[in-house]
Image: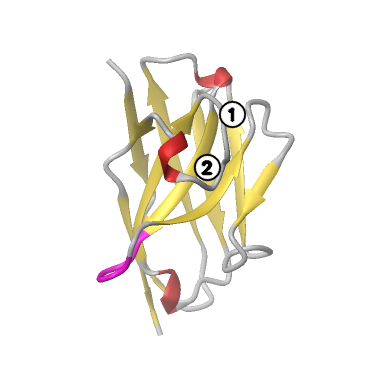
Amino acid sequence: QVQLVESGGGLVQAGGSLRLSCAASGFTFSNYIMGWFRQAPGKEREFVAALNWSGRSTYYADSVNSRFTISRDNAKNTVYLQMNSLKPEDTALYYCAAAPSGTYYREDRYDYWGQGTQVTVSS
């Protein structure tokens, strides 16, 4: 059974930090590109960050570049998103996803999705 479980969301003041985690099971984690997407109230889901199989190559949306860092630990089947200098605009439900290959920022390339973890940033 394939499963992606996000955790680490919560309420934080603007300028603060959070670290999200995504625990994966039911597939060969090291063979998959891992990504984070988010969806704010009233908006479409958007790409946030992704990294390749080894974690040596990372990709970020312009809105989070230099503030967020994605990483993975293949020994633990876990991907992380370190979020610093948070802004109210970062408030959203954050989803972890896995893709075997393809264009990292396209939702349709991802086969597996988690249920999401809520991040709320107050001003």
- What element does badge 1 sit on? strand
Query: Which residue position is annotated with label 1?
Result: 73
Picture layout, residue 29 above or below residue 45:
above
Q: Amino acid at mark 1?
A: Asp
Give the side of residue 57 with respect to residue 13, left or right: right
Decide if residue 42 is on the left or right side of residue 98.
Answer: left
Assign the magenta stretch its main secondary structure.
Answer: loop
Report, in whole angstroms, how far the alpha carbon at label 2 lies from the one at label 1: 8 Å
Q: Which mark is residue 80?
A: 2
Q: Residues within 10 Å of mark 1 (few under 14, many from 20)?
A: some
The residue depicted at 36 percent of the width and 57 percent of the height is 45
Q: Are marks 2 and 1 in contact (CB under 8 Å)?
A: yes
* Residue 18 or residue 4, whichever sits in front: 4
Dot 2 amino acid type: Tyr
Quick one: quadrant of the C terminus?
A: bottom left
- Give the magenta part as a residue range: 39-43
State whether residue 46 appears in this view: yes
Where is residue 112? Give x, y as percent. 36, 30
For the point 52% across and 42% down, which residue is it? 80
Q: Quadrant of the N terminus?
A: top left
Q: Is residue 23 magenta?
A: no
Q: Residue furthest right?
A: 56
